[in-house]
Amino acid sequence: MSVKYLIKNVAIVNEGEIQIRDVLFYDDYIQKIGLIQTQDDFLVINGTGKYLLPGVIDAQVHFREPGLSNKGDIFSESRAAAAGGVTSFIDMPNTVPNVLSNELLKQKYDIAARNSAINYGFAMGISASNMDELLASDTTQYLMITDDGLYFSGKGNILADNNDLMEHIFSRSNCLIAIHAEKEAIIEANEIKYKKEFGENIPARMHPIIRSEAACYAATKDAIDIANKYNARLHILHLSTAAETHLFRNDLPLAEKNITCEVSVHHLWFSDADYEKLGMRIKWNPAIKSMKDKNGLMKALLEDKIDMITTDHAPHLLEEKDVPYFQSKSGAPMVQHTLSCMLSFYQEGLISLEKLVEKMCHNPALIYNIAKRGFIKEGYYADLVLVDFDESWVVSKNNILYKCGWSPLEGTQFNSIIRKTFVNGHLVYDNGIVIDHICGKALSNT
């Protein structure tokens, strides 16, 4: 029998409101919200002065398993995620081998069923090699189809770099297609230019100039134009420029949008000024850009031109990062710290808790049609995060849970703390301790 948890007198952040209520949950689900009398078989948690959020749904991670598990795996990264208040993830297809078939997709679901502390979903990869077979199938079975990360396996795998390919796919698709929007031709021309100037030792500060605003904007605009032509369901991953945000609409409710987008937390947290200190450790694709871009992304998030927040969690070993430009891997670990970053923005007055929950919890569930998650409602799964603003802590190697063992946020002080994380009504993280439950479930739209 599952534990019957009762959180008393807690500030529930849900659907644009903050209300002091009690929450009773057991047997996977939230059973009752309101004024609830304590019973002998309830495990009571005092929520006074604390906030209860729906569990974060991180809809873009790279947990590296199979094939790259020296950097991270579902066991390690799901536990880091739980410590960061993330209760569900969607993993991208650029594992080894790339997930381009149902057989490989099932293998990942099987691994997660054995090893994930939190709820899990996996994206199906699409490229020129499998698109005809994939689009002829029932694609509604997938959370998303995406090219994200597949360009690491070879040139030509970024859909947004090939308008003819996008025409072919968008004219036939009947599901959400999420794309990495950069133009490879522009990037390659910049690489040639700056390699002539700097040789192999291109400074990290040149990364946003090489993977430039122009490369991002051109790709995003073309993708949107073609998606609109065919009324296709398009999602643009990890926006990095203020210019791109003007291509998106905020005059429609989310349910009526065919074209949506996201920002990853590192594009809100860092700017090009941070390359001097952190170097290749903050080398991501698309690149972290200017302070103007950082501020423009936050503005667009608040104005609902950007629909949700992700991490693009992408762990690499430090020896893969702290090397010359062309050898340095793009990506870094973030999933344990993304909610803490956003809570810091709240404390600075940059975003409300209600808007934060909308973008990190509600909207991912709506965009990916995830059933009974992302909200604090009776009858929904009890994916919950208890947050306390009365304690500070500093990111350090002794509290980092990533398998790769480092974070670009080391030395950062956060002035809030995640007290508890519940997944399907089970306590998986409690005041600094990950409880070794395998209680994640596959994300479902039914």
Image (tube, rainbow, N blue to C red):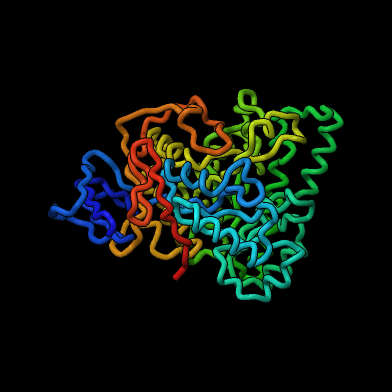
* Residue 321 percent across, percent down from the top left: 67, 33
Q: Nearer the viewer, residue 12 or 96?
A: 96
* Residue 358 percent across, percent down from the top left: 41, 52
Q: Nearer the viewer, residue 144 or 275?
A: 144
Who's the residue at 47% across and 62% down the image?
443
Q: Tell me which corner region of the image, top left, top right, bottom left or bottom right, holds residue 264.
A: top right
Image height of 169 relative to 187, above or below: below
Who's the residue at 38% across and 47% down the image?
428
Instruction: Assign the N terminus to one quadrant of the image.
Output: bottom left
* Residue 208 percent across, percent down from the top left: 69, 36
Who's the residue at 35% across and 46% down the image?
385
Q: Nearer the viewer, residue 259 or 144?
A: 144
Asked if residue 240 shows in the view, the reply is yes
* Residue 232 percent across, percent down from the top left: 62, 68
User: Is 169 situated left or right of 355 in this image?
Assistant: right
Number of numbered labels in the structure image = 0
Instruction: Assign the C terminus to one quadrant of the image.
Output: bottom left
Asked if residue 20 shows in the view, the reply is no
Image height of 261 relative to 341, above or below: below
Q: Nearer the viewer, residue 284 or 129?
A: 129
User: Is 10 situated left or right of 333 in this image?
Assistant: left
Q: Tell me which corner region of the image, top left, top right, bottom left or bottom right, holds residue 399.
A: top left
Who's the residue at 83% across and 32% down the image?
195
Q: Residue furthest right?
A: 196
